[in-house]
Structures are given as structure tokens and as C-alpha cells.
Amino acid sequence: KFYTPNVSSNDQTYNAPVFGNRETPISQELYTIGYYIVTVDGPQVTVDYYSSPSGCDDDHRLSETPRLTFSRRERFGYSLNGRQFLITPGAPYRPVMDRFQGTTARILDGLNQNLARDYSGRALAKAVNTGWTARSRADRLFSDILSLWGLTSLEDPSADVYALSMSFHPDEVGKSISRAVLLARNPDGTWVTAVDRNRGGVKKFIVGPWAPGCALGSYGVDMRTHTAWAVLNFDGDFAVGCGEKKPVVDFTEFQPDQAKYRDQYAAKFNYDLAAICKDLRERQVANVMRF
């Protein structure tokens, strides 16, 4: 039998008048049949929620088992070595920041745009959790591994668009510093350039820091602060490591204080810097003539 929640919720009815609201709703799904798979891996716990429609849309006692078609509806998790951040609807993800050993991760930009509400009309927050795994030599990574949960929702398997930054150890990168990019782990355990796992967006590599306006698919490395960043719309496991052998670099995005890095990249990957500079000058002239 399914039960429909009260309107107003018990929290609003009994707690709010005396103590204030004591609950922060995260998600809600009604009239489905579901189960959870809980995976414990050291300090980390990951929960996968699967459910199937029941054919009911109100209080109803099932007289026979309906045809069940299960699908994964939600994944969330937490870690004893991480942190939790409650992000209310419309609020920025910028408070999300955590450190582990020598690695720092932070969300630079993005808003919780989930407008869903529970049956009682309460807005649904997002519980963003972090966790960490120390890298091993076999990983061949330049940072420790960040696990990030809670950016997706029941209503949308894609996360809000956000910018993630992670620091790396420059003394361990050596000559590979020009290939340090933010990576994401595939379901099969392999590491790929993080933006390759986005849903949509245009892949564009930028040498320099993240800046407001960088669109989904943009990613880069800031050699001055030794951080790699990417604009993403999914959560999971992330780390800094070696990217493509010759990334497609957008040289128009270089900022003045990054000019020396432009030259280093051009030399490293055999780009024709003279042709690039000529193209940039022509674009500047065209922009002046346009106005």
C-alpha cells in the first residue's frame, strides 16, 4: 500500500511553530517500488537507488504484483574523509571546497537550478558531498582523487553546469606540465579528459585560469597557480593527469599574464606561432573595422 504525504508536512505542522523547520528535503519519489544498493569502499559509501513504476498515482493497495521495470534513478554518497554542503535552490555551488593531503578542490561557479518541490510544496536542496582517495603510482596522476556526489537529481540525470578546479603537484609533473588537465573516471575505471563525459557542450582547451563566461566543455590549466579546471555537467571521480598528446588550444583566450605560456605551448606541440599571431592580428583588425 502507498501512503500520500500530508500537506503541510509533519515538520511544518508540528516543528515549525515551536522549533522552526528541522528538515531539509533533498528528493522525493511517490508511488514507485524501489530498492537501494549500498557500496562501502573504505571511508566512502555510495548509494544507488533503483525504482519501477507501479501503475498507481495515489493511495492504493496493490492486489497483485504489477509488471516491474527497474532503472537507476539516483546516486548519492558520502565519505568519512570528505565534507557535506547543503545548497538551496538558486544558491551558488561556490561554498564547495575541500582539501586532502596536498590536493585542493573547489567549485568555482554554478547555481543549483533545481526547481522541484516535494508533495508538501517544500523546495528541494542538494546535498553535495566530497570524498578522497590517495593516488597510487599505478594511477599515474598528478593529484589525489576527488569523489563528488549530489549534483544530479531524480528529475535530471545531468548536473547543473559548474566549473571545477583541482590543484596538482608541479614538482611531480615535470616535463608533462603542459599536458596536465582535469580527468574523470569512466564506469570501466579508465581515466579520460573530464569534458569528454559531458552531455553536450563544445570541447575547448584554454591555457590560463577559469574566467566567467567559459561555456560547457571549456577546460584548461593555470600554470601560475598549478590548477586544472573544467566546466562540467556531471559528478563522479576526478583527478589531474595527462591529457591528449596535442590538445586543440584556443590561443585567442590567452590573457596578457599568460603570454609566456602561449609560447611554451606553441613550442611544445609544434604550433605555428607566427601564423597564430598573424591570425590574431587579423581578427583584431576585423573587430575594429566591424565597429
Image (cartoon, grey):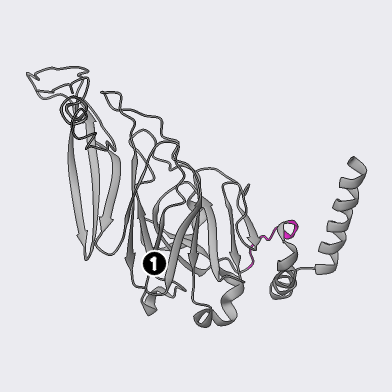
Which residue occupies 23% across, 37% down? 23
Tell me which segment is drawn in magenta. Answer: 246-252
Asked whether residue 157 is drawn in magenta, I would say no
- Find residue 15 and report its image quarter: top left
Please provide percent x and percent y for residue 98: 39, 62
Q: Is residue 247 left or right of residue 47?
A: right
Please provide percent x and percent y for residue 61: 9, 18
Q: Give 186 or 144, whichever is nearer the viewer.
A: 144
Mark 1 = which residue? 99
> Which quadrant: the C terminus?
top right
Question: Considering the numbered disc 1 on the image, is that residue within a helix, a strand or a loop?
Answer: strand
Q: Residues within 10 Å of mark 1 (few under 14, many from 20)?
A: some
25 above or below 13? Answer: below
Which residue occupies 28% across, 35% down? 27
Q: Is residue 5 left or right of residue 133?
A: left
**Magenta segment, prevailing SS (helix, strand or loop):** loop
